[in-house]
Structures are given as structure tokens and as C-alpha cells.
């Protein structure tokens, strides 16, 4: 009976799902959300709630603060002027986001994990074989475990910046620009 249960369980799980580390499963959940929301600048309250299951609380707080700052910037910008807002995809190292992802080798460092994310954007506005049709780059996902739950702590972008840094910089600049 036990063998029958194990055999049925192995058929129910996707290949390789059982042997993935929880940090890898979480990385996959994060990028599943990111790819379903291409070009997302600051997420809506509903999207922030979804991200609350994926991101560290500090990142959610920064997103909330950035949304409040952006609202203030829009409010204080004179009619006809462009307000100081965050634009482009915040969650990948590319303005237009990504359309595909694969993962590099997991590196565990205690309660933290680092997973390289190989990202691809296929831009259908360009014909096949055009030099601007496909863009490939690598970001680095930093995760942290707390109370048995993995959360994205930061995303390091190919240009040396990070998700956390983009949000912190925006908050500093919005404070100056949107008085």
C-alpha cells in the first residue's frame, strides 16, 4: 500500500519538483509573478498584497513608501508638467521586463540563498533575427529564510543596482523633487 501511494505521488509531482530546495521554489514563484506582470512600475495595493507572500517585509514597506511618495509627486506637479514617477519594470534589470527566465546554481549561505536568474526579453515589435528582438541578461536573486519562510530580500541587477536601491533612491529624490 505504501509503495502504491509513493508511486502515485511521484506521478502527481512535476519532474524535479520534489528535489528543489525551498529557496528555488520561492524564486520560481517570484519570477512567475514577475513574468505575469511585465513592465510593472510601482505595484497596486492588490499587487503589493500578492507580493507580500514573495518579498521580505522591508521591500514591501519600501514599495508602500514609494507609492505614497509617487502620489505626492503627482499631486504637487504643476498641470502640464510630467510628475516624478517610477517607470519601467522594477522587478527585473530591464525597463521593459522579461518574457522568459531560467535559473542558475543555488548558493546557500546560512539562512540566505543566492540564485542567478537568466532573463530573456523577446520583443515582438522587431522581426526575427533583428539585433534588437532578443535581449539576454542575468540578475541575482537574494533570498532570506525567516520562521521557515523564504522571501526575496533583494534583486541585484546587471548594472550594479538593485531593487532595494532603486526604491531607496526614488524615495530620496522624491523628497527633494516633490515638495
Image (cartoon, grey):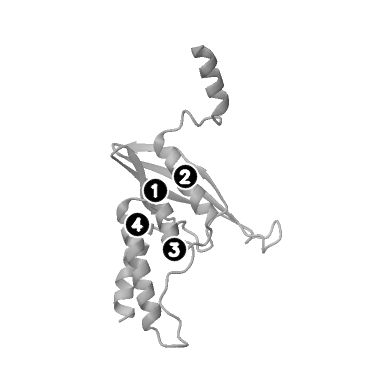
Image point (46%, 28%), residue name: 19
Q: The C terminus is located in which quarter? A: bottom left
Image point (43%, 64%), residue name: 42
* Sequence-first disc among 2 and 3: 2
For disc 4, the marked residue is 60
Q: Nearer the viewer, mark 2 or mark 3?
A: 3
Binning the other alpha carbons within 10 Å of mark 2 as few (below 14), some (14 to 19) or many (20 upward) gives: few
Tell whether 134 sits left or right of 166. Answer: right
Residue 75 visible in the displayed image:
yes
* Sequence-first disc among 1 and 3: 3
Binning the other alpha carbons within 10 Å of mark 4 as few (below 14), some (14 to 19) or many (20 upward) gives: some
Q: Could you tell me how far apart the alpha carbons at marks 4 and 3 are, in whole angstroms?
A: 12 Å
Q: Could you tell me how far apart the alpha carbons at marks 1 and 3 are, in whole angstroms?
A: 15 Å
* Sequence-first disc among 4 and 3: 3
Q: Is residue 169 above or below residue 81?
A: above
Q: Could you tell me how far apart the alpha carbons at marks 1 and 2 are, in whole angstroms?
A: 10 Å
Marks 2 and 1: in contact by CB < 8 Å?
yes
Residue 14 coordinates in the image, percent (x, y): 55, 31
Marks 3 and 1: in contact by CB < 8 Å?
no
For disc 3, the marked residue is 44
* Sequence-first disc among 2 and 4: 2
Q: Is residue 28 above or below residue 167?
A: above
Image point (32%, 69%), residue name: 171
Q: Could you tell me how far apart the alpha carbons at marks 2 and 3 are, in whole angstroms?
A: 19 Å
For disc 2, the marked residue is 29
Amino acid at each position: 500500500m505504501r509503495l502504491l501511494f509513493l508511486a502515485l505521488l511521484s506521478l502527481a509531482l512535476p519532474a524535479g519538483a520534489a528535489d528543489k530546495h525551498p529557496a528555488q521554489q520561492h524564486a520560481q514563484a517570484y519570477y512567475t509573478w514577475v513574468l505575469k506582470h511585465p513592465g510593472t512600475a510601482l505595484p497596486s495595493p492588490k499587487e503589493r498584497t500578492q507580493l507580500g507572500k514573495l518579498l521580505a517585509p522591508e521591500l514591501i514597506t519600501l514599495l508602500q513608501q514609494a507609492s505614497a511618495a509617487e502620489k505626492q509627486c503627482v499631486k504637487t506637479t504643476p498641470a502640464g508638467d510630467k510628475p516624478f514617477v517610477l517607470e519601467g519594470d522594477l522587478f527585473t534589470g530591464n525597463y521593459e521586463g522579461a518574457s522568459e527566465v531560467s535559473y542558475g546554481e543555488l548558493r546557500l549561505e546560512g539562512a540566505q540563498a543566492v540564485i542567478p536568474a537568466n532573463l530573456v526579453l523577446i520583443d515582438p515589435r522587431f522581426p526575427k533575427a533583428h539585433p534588437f528582438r532578443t535581449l539576454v541578461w542575468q540578475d541575482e536573486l537574494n533570498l532570506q529564510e525567516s520562521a521557515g519562510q523564504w522571501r526575496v530580500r533583494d534583486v541585484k541587477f546587471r548594472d550594479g543596482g538593485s531593487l532595494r536601491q532603486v526604491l531607496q533612491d526614488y524615495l530620496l529624490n522624491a523628497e527633494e523633487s516633490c515638495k
